Image: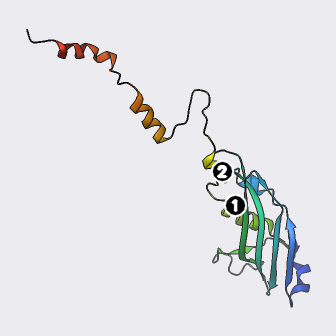
Amino acid sequence: MKWVIHQLAKYRHDGMPIDQYVQLDKVMERNPDIRKISPVHVKGHCTFGAAQMTCHFHLTGTLTLPCARTWEDVEYPIDIKTVELFSWSDAHKDNDEDIHYVDGDVIDVDPVLEELIVVEVPLQVFKEDASHQPHTGGKDWTYLTDEELSAIRENEPKKSDPRLADLAKYFDQTDE
């Protein structure tokens, strides 16, 4: 979403309502864990001052992320409510980090929306039935739970180290 500052003057008294879908594919470049993103529904309202714009955004959409156990696709819904300030005045540019400063005459909201989505991505997501799926091995590896491993160790016969076999014979000898 891009707006020219001069064209926004007509919304100065009543504000500008927002209700549109935005495709933010650059989010996938910023976070490679995001496999797919649905069009993001952006609703809200923007009000204007002399040299700034205040926007109340509500973003909803769906991200496709990898399951941490199975690596399969998991759909993760996003629902973000935020207030963002945009300013085209250089008066207090160095003092406030919460304001997005506009260079030129065009307000580009997409990078701000992308940043909001990237921050919302969780570290791990799990597919609903991921914990009940059987774990299989691969080439040269297998998967065992702690219980399975301890059961195998209990049922195995005790093996002695072949390097210590001569030492065992030493204790079997009787004193002569």
* Placement of the C terminus among the 4 image quadrants: top left
Q: Name the spot of residue 6 as percent of width and height, x first.
A: 90, 80
Along the line of sight, which residue is nearer the eye, 122 or 14? 122
| Label 2 neighbour load within 10 Å: few <14, some 14-19, many 20+ | few
Q: Name the spot of residue 105 as percent of width and height, x first.
A: 85, 73
Task: Please name the amino acid that badge 2 sits on.
Answer: Asp
Q: Name the spot of residue 17 as percent of width and height, x first.
A: 86, 81
Along the line of sight, which residue is nearer the eye, 25 or 101? 25
Task: Please name the amino acid that badge 1 sits on.
Answer: Val
Along the line of sight, which residue is nearer the eye, 159 or 116? 159
Name the quadrant containing residue 80: bottom right
Q: Which residue is mark 1?
A: 118
Q: Give the residue at x 25% y 13%.
A: 166
Q: Residue furthest front?
A: 155
* Placement of the N terminus among the 4 image quadrants: bottom right
Disc ID at residue 105 = none
Q: Residue furthest bottom?
A: 13
Name the quadrant containing residue 54: bottom right
Q: Which residue is mark 2?
A: 129
Q: Give the residue at x 86% y 67%.
A: 21
Q: Give the residue at x 65% y 73%.
A: 97
Mark before the other along the chain sequence, 2 or 1: 1
Label 1 sits on a secondary structure element that is helix
Location of residue 68 with respect to 60 vertically, above or below: above
Label 2 sits on a secondary structure element that is loop
- Between disc 2 and disc 1, the foreground one is 2
Is residue 45 among the parts visible in the rendering? yes
Q: CA distance from mark 2 to mark 1?
A: 26 Å
Q: Residue furthest left?
A: 176
Q: Name the spot of residue 34 as percent of width and height, x first.
A: 72, 53
